[in-house]
Image (spheres, helix red, strand yellow):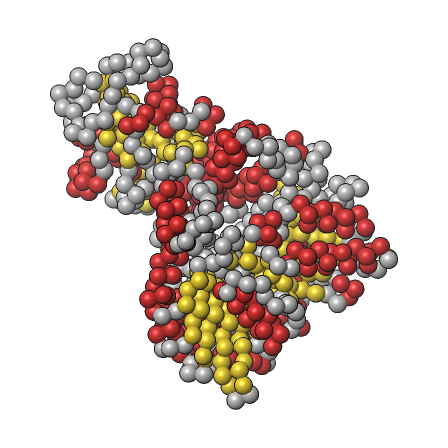
């Protein structure tokens, strides 16, 4: 990002693209297992698809509105789009090069081979012909088109083949939509040719396995269809065929003002999203100028919105290849989650939490206790109420099943289901309806805000009276992503935290302002103010010559007010270390501005997702877990939580996790003052330190120490070994 050298801030979109480049870089590293590199390639492609449909889609809306809205750097929407498209085109080239020049040759050496027509034996061609005739032919349906208003409304990101055929054939498709073309436009196809689209069914696998004597051989779906096009388009002369896809704008906001029914309103948004405006057309490089011009006009995009792709399109589909069975030597060694010693099988969940606050670090430690907590609450006759937020739940959620069961048993179950969780709206609508049918009170979020806080309150009647048990999380109540995302869970029955949680939950469900929060900080109520106060304390201590520092771990940092406060703290002498996985609009290490700020990003096998804040605070060393990133949307437009970690053992573990991040010299990248990232230098004397591996090992050591505390391990001294 050379253009950012003189800037005080980094553009959000370019910063995100830099993050996705770090993901793609993992696909290019020879010391990463080969199939894991395929996975990183697929992740980078999936990330890019979402970025184009949401962020670019949103910028297109701003550009067309002709408003003077600018970003944190003062760039207009048009200026941002110009820079984004150049960067996206380069990333597409890098992805294609990574696949063609690095991954596919190395996969072939390991007997994982992508087959082309020229590679197929007669037996394999016969197999594919039978597959085409028996399955594919019945699923796909060609559509003859002319473009314009009669061009079919292709859903976003769906892979298609565009076929140019010669007119005058004996047979013509029944569903022909061809129309007249303008002879005045010399770029249109010759009058003796026309186009047919072949949308490839979403139900069909993209990578088709071919029987092979040894190893694993596969072929892409579009290659098979193209191989047998003459059977699909009988008696028609095929001039050319090329794959393409349309990426549509998914940044369609729900207009809540005056909306009586949020549920039906969200269903309308989901329907509209399928056929929204095209923001990018991706087309294979082998397509002719005639085909390129035809498709561009048909989907109504400008020339700079067309991406020319060398090699396969839609590389997110390569997740299937990364997950093939066998070939374990080409994958990361398994990291089965360690059991949490505090919640051993058969332990009384509520008694354990009542004894002391409990902290879990997923997925290094199992997510089972979180599910067990809600299951036990559903079945325990002493539990009278459960209050929970749901932002993203898994497909077959045991947590939702437990809430249904609890409601069926007559417990008071209140659930805030966020219908506006992007790309999970349809699933959340289903969960909300199921919970309502079970008898739960379901609240569809808050008007104008997204409920992003992760909170579950269990109210239990005990001998001492009513006691509130609370689970706070940095991640979603999702059993599937809990195995892939690093997140903390904090269980507590602290009276004040429980009361704060109840006040906040009831304020959300009752659409009111909560009573004063004593320990919790919540957005958009007081979270921003609390963070600013904590930063200001460090500034004042530094100005008085006292020790002052801030350490934080977030997914994104883009809020200008917080960035400016951190700049002020750096200038006062506060030492600041930030672990920012993705977007970072702050420029670190710049003399006179931010020389006391260090920023690192970790990209490894697990997605860094926890939000952790640590302030020296005059030696008190305050630690917090949060659901919120340091972004304006989180602080202003979402219901978020920041919870203090007060138990000494829990706090120590949280702080140890931060130290591990800043010791990483295997998977860490450092953000320089010029806006570029570079790999953290590996120092031989200190050895390799991979933070995720360290944290996984520590979780195992914790369990081993608890289950066999008297075990003594004798470690012999090896002559010549460095001490």
Residue ranking furthest to the left = 170
- Place of residue 504 in the rendered image (x, y in percent of width and height, measured from the top left): 56, 66
- Place of residue 156 in the rendered image (x, y in percent of width and height, measured from the top left): 37, 38
The residue sitting at 84% across, 60% down in the picture is: 546
Quarter of the rendering containing residue 443: bottom left
**Viewport quadrant of the C terminus:** bottom right
The residue sitting at 32% across, 45% down in the picture is: 216
> 600 or 695: nearer the eye?
600
Vertical comparison of 691 with 39: above or below: below
The answer to whether residue 227 is visible is no
> 202 or 330: nearer the eye?
202
The residue sitting at 53% across, 35% down in the picture is: 62
- Place of residue 43 in the rendered image (x, y in percent of width and height, measured from the top left): 46, 45
Q: Tag count in the figure? A: 0
**Is 53 left, or right, of 692 in this rendering?**
left
**Viewport quadrant of the N terminus:** top right
The residue sitting at 60% across, 77% down in the picture is: 495
The answer to whether residue 554 is visible is yes
Vertical comparison of 665 with 127: above or below: below
**Is 580 left, or right, of 265 in this rendering?**
right
**Is 340 left, or right, of 75 in this rendering?**
left
């Amino acid at each position: 990002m050379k253009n950012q050298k003189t800037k005080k801030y980094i553009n959000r979109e370019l910063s995100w693209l830099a993050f996705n480049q770090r993901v793609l870089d993992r696909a290019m590293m020879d010391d990463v297992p080969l199939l894991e590199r395929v996975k990183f390639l697929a992740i980078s492609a999936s990330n890019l698809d979402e970025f184009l449909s949401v962020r670019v889609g949103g910028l297109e809306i701003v550009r067309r509105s002709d408003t003077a809205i600018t970003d944190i750097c003062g760039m207009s929407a048009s200026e941002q789009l110009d820079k984004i498209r150049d960067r996206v085109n380069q990333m597409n080239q890098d992805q294609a090069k990574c696949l063609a020049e690095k991954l596919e040759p190395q996969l072939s050496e390991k007997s994982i081979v992508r087959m082309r027509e020229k590679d197929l034996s007669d037996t394999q061609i016969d197999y594919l012909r039978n597959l085409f005739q028996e399955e594919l032919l019945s699923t796909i349906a060609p559509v003859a088109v002319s473009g314009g208003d009669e061009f079919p409304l292709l859903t976003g990101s769906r892979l298609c083949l565009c076929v140019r055929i010669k007119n005058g054939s004996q047979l013509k498709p029944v569903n022909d939509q061809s129309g007249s073309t303008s002879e005045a436009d010399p770029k249109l196809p010759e009058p003796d040719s026309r186009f047919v689209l072949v949308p490839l069914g979403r139900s069909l696998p993209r990578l088709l396995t071919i029987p092979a004597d040894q190893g694993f051989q596969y072929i892409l779906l579009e290659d098979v269809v193209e191989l047998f096009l003459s059977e699909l388009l009988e008696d028609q002369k095929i001039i050319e065929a090329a794959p393409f896809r349309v990426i549509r704008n998914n940044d369609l906001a729900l207009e809540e003002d005056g909306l009586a029914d949020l549920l039906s309103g969200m269903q309308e948004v989901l329907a509209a999203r399928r056929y929204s405006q095209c923001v990018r057309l991706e087309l294979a490089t082998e397509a002719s100028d005639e085909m390129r011009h035809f498709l561009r006009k048909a989907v109504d995009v400008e020339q700079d919105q067309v991406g020319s792709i060398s090699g396969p399109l839609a590389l997110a589909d390569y997740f299937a290849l990364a997950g093939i069975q066998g070939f374990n030597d080409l994958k990361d060694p398994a990291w089965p989650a360690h059991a949490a010693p505090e919640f051993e099988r058969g332990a009384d969940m509520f008694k354990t939490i009542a004894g002391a606050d409990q902290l879990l670090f997923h997925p290094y430690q199992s997510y089972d206790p979180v599910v067990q907590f809600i299951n036990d609450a559903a079945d325990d006759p002493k539990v009278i109420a459960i209050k929970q937020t749901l932002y993203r739940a898994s497909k077959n959620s045991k947590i939702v099943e437990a809430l249904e069961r609890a409601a069926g048993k007559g417990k008071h179950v209140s659930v805030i289901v966020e219908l506006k969780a992007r790309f999970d709206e349809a699933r959340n609508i289903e969960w909300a309806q199921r919970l309502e049918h079970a008898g739960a009170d379901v609240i569809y979020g808050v008007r104008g805000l997204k409920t992003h806080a992760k909170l579950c309150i269990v109210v239990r009647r005990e001998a001492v009276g009513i006691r509130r048990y609370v689970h706070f999380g940095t991640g979603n109540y999702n059993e599937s992503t809990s195995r892939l995302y690093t997140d903390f869970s904090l269980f507590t029955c602290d009276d004040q935290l429980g009361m704060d949680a109840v006040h906040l939950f009831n304020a959300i469900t009752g659409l009111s302002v909560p009573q004063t929060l004593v320990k919790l900080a919540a957005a958009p109520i007081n979270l921003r103010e609390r963070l600013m106060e904590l930063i200001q304390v460090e500034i004042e201590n530094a100005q008085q010559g006292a020790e002052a520092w801030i350490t934080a771990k977030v997914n994104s940092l883009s809020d200008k007010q917080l960035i400016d406060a951190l700049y002020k703290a750096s200038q006062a002498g506060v030492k600041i270390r930030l672990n920012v996985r993705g977007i970072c609009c702050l420029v670190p290490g710049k003399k006179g501005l931010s020389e006391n700020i260090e920023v690192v990003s970790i990209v490894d096998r697990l997605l860094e997702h926890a939000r952790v804040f640590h302030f020296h605070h005059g030696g008190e060393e305050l630690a917090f877990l949060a659901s919120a990133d340091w972004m304006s949307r989180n602080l202003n437009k979402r219901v978020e939580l920041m919870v203090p970690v007060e138990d000494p053992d829990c706090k120590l573990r949280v702080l140890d996790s931060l130290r591990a991040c800043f010791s990483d010299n295997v998977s860490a990248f450092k953000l320089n003052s010029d806006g570029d990232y570079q790999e953290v230098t590996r120092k031989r004397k200190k050895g390799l330190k991979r933070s995720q591996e360290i944290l996984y090992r520590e979780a195992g050591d914790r369990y081993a120490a608890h289950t066999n505390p008297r075990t003594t391990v004798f470690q012999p001294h090896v002559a010549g070994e460095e001490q």
